[in-house]
Amino acid sequence: MQNNGLDRNILKDTIEIPIYAGSELTWEKFFGEEVGSVKEVFPLLQFKTAEQIIKISDYNKIARLYGNEEYELEDDEYIMLCDFENMKELRNKVLKKGNHVIEVAGKQYISKYSECKSGFIEMSTSHVNTGIILVPDSCAVTDEMKERAFLAANYNADTEEKREEIEAIFTSGDSGFIQNLSNQGLEIDGITKIKIIESSVGLATIVTFIAIYLGIIFLIASSAILALKQLTESSDNKQRYTILRKIGCDEKMIQKALFRQIGIFFMTPLILAIIHSVFGIQFALSMLAGIADKKDLLPSIIATILVMGAIYGTYFMATYWESKNIIREE
């Protein structure tokens, strides 16, 4: 990077670590006896994929930079880091049996925990770490097992303008640094915190807009139909309310009956919609598991419920007040 025009002074807190992998330890070998049942559920998984291996001290450097939890290991222990929900469940199924053993560089290691621990190396818009194995520093991994190098750093900037200038060096196609790398046939795959925030906000906005827009359109249409139907019935039943008054029913009793009638009329489809929404939201969360965590989507869900409730409630109250005017005694 320096040889192609990068000024190291624009970075601070620079950390570079090696990431290892080897054919001796793949997903298939990690799952062991459980691989058959896993293949039945997820037949398209690439079980020949080599596990990523990182020494514990190298990972702790990255974790310290990110502000994540750091870990410790004995010479015969390992830790599995995973935060991608579906893969985490599969790995925990194996680890919960206890004493799960793997072999790295000719030595066997036993899992320190009976479940995956939280952690990651690469920043992302969501939880996409499918698995990183932390091994002791004494693990005899070799240079031949080194899969790639990973570098993390902070921008050496105190102002927003300076951060944007440094950001452009790494992300702009017009950047001399990027062009020099391209001319040399070199590719560096990377991500910045600013880009992550921008893409995350953009994705959340799109999903929320589509969901709320479609929901509001259907809600207004259905509420209008319900209101029109109820107002029509109130007009048709005007004579019946007149008869109720003649037999001794006071206005308070009539209005209470009217409120209950309209309430039941509006609540019946709402209850059905809530039942559908419960299962629909669960399905949507499972589909978005790789994009966002449940707690990340909670504000959007709450905002949607409030907006829908306000619209539906407005139609309900407008229908009630107008129905009262229709059946009011001359």
Image: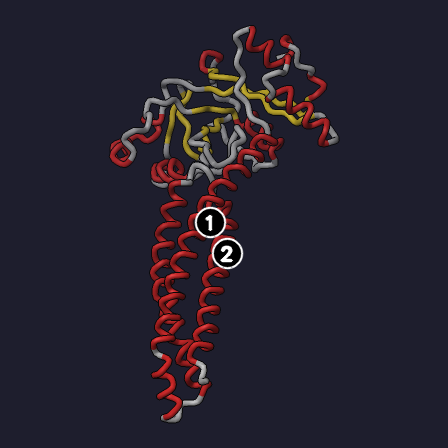
Q: How many marks?
A: 2
What's the distance in space between the residues labelled 2 and 1, CA to CA?
Answer: 8 Å
Which type of secondary structure does the marked residue at label 2 adopt? helix
The answer to whether any part of residue 114 appears in the image is no
Q: Are marks 2 and 1 in contact (CB under 8 Å)?
A: yes
Front-most of 168 and 150? 168
- Eyeballing the image, is 220 above or below 119? below
Image coordinates for residue 325, horizontal then vertical, percent: 47, 77
- In the displayed structure, does residue 179 sit left or right of residue 226? right
Q: Looking at the image, which residue is at 32% across and 28% down?
A: 45
Image coordinates for residue 99, horizontal then vertical, percent: 37, 36
Front-most of 95 and 11? 11
- Eyeballing the image, is 237 above or below 265? below
Q: Which mark is residue 212?
A: 1
Q: Which mark is residue 257?
A: none
Q: Splitting the image into 4 quarters, where does residue 69 fall? A: top right
Front-most of 38 and 291? 291
Q: Earlier in the sequence, mark 2 or mark 1?
A: 1
The local crowd at label 2, few if under 14, some if 14 to 19, many if 20 or more residues have their Cα within 10 Å, is: some
As shown in the figure, which amino acid type bears the numbered disc 2? Val
Q: Looking at the image, which residue is at 45% across and 28% down?
A: 133
The local crowd at label 1, few if under 14, some if 14 to 19, many if 20 or more residues have their Cα within 10 Å, is: some
Q: Looking at the image, which residue is at 38% across and 24% down?
A: 103
Instruction: Report which residue position mark 2 lands on.
Output: 307
Q: Looking at the image, which residue is at 45% across and 33% down?
A: 128
As shown in the figure, which amino acid type bears the numbered disc 1? Ile
- Eyeballing the image, is 22 above or below 123? above
- Quarter of the image with the N terminus in it: top right
